[in-house]
Amino acid sequence: MKILIRKILLIVAGLICLTSFAKSAQLSDSEVKNLLVRIRENRITQADFQEQRVIHLMKKPVASSGKVWFQPPNKFRREVEGNSPSLTVSDGRQLWIYYPNFKSAERYPLGKRSPLDSTVAAINSALNLENIENTFQITAAKVDGGYELTLIPRTASMKRIFQKLDLHINDNLQAERTEMLLPNGDRIVTTYSNQTRAPVPPSTFEFSPPPGAEVAAPLGQ
């Protein structure tokens, strides 16, 4: 379960940036709140990404790229391209992870007292920037060309997944870069481009396993 929750949080960490957060001129608490309001009013719905995972046991970072979409309050899609492609889709009721190379899919129900419910609820709070101060300790600063924010989880369960999330947005409130520090010292650095605020078709958040795919339900539901 811990591995699963970390997998989902790593995916959604990028989505937090699509809602667009963000040393330098430190912002006051009221200025941070005003910034979050502006971000909510100018929500990014999709972007391309380049990601590097700096793993302390490996000499070279593990690189990946792809696209991500988000629709509040709880729908998202993340496509990873390259030699190890994957697709993660949630319509708010269930979450799918599909691995094309292996023709295998994993289905995780949401709601109905699913073990993931509390984690997903915290994620949705972050995605929508509602009561986010209750979930993270937030510090922010105005820098040349934008803003930088640091998010530190408040709960012990979240701290076991990641220790800190640094985010940079530009003056147009578009996400440009994130860096996540994991408890074991690994880092995940993600940069974003081609951000848009265009409406996303509902079908983007739908998924049906292709014919012949092996479907697993790790939570037994």
Image (spheres, rainbow, N blue to C red):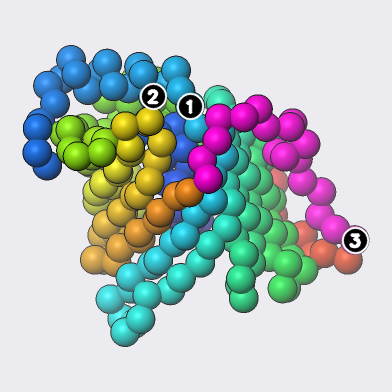
User: Disc 3 residue type?
Assistant: Pro
Query: Pointer 3: residues within 10 angstroms few (<14), some, or many (20+)?
Result: few
Q: Which residue is mark 1?
A: 43
Relative to 37, does residue 101 appear above or below in the rendering? below
Distance between mark 3 and mark 2 Cα atoms: 41 Å
Q: Viewed as shown, does residue 45 lie left or right of 96?
A: left
x, y percent for residue 1: 48, 55
Judged by its main secondary structure, the magenta piece is loop
**Residue 65 shows in this picture:** yes
Q: Residue at x 36, y 19 (%)?
A: 38
Q: Nearer the viewer, mark 3 or mark 2?
A: 2
x, y percent for residue 97: 65, 55
x, y percent for residue 106: 68, 57
Q: Nearer the viewer, residue 220 or 11?
A: 11
Q: Nearer the viewer, residue 214 or 137?
A: 137
202 part of magenta stretch = yes
Relative to 34, does residue 172 appear above or below in the rendering? below
Q: At numbered mark 1, what does the secondary structure look like: helix, strand or loop?
A: loop
| Residues at circles 2 and 1 in contact by the CB criterion of under 8 Å | yes
Q: Which residue is mark 3?
A: 211
x, y percent for residue 201: 73, 32
Q: Residue at x 77, y 59 (%)?
A: 215
Q: Which residues are magenta?
A: 194-211
Q: Which residue is mark 2?
A: 39
**Residue 220 shows in this picture:** no
Q: Residue at x 29, y 59 (%)?
A: 182
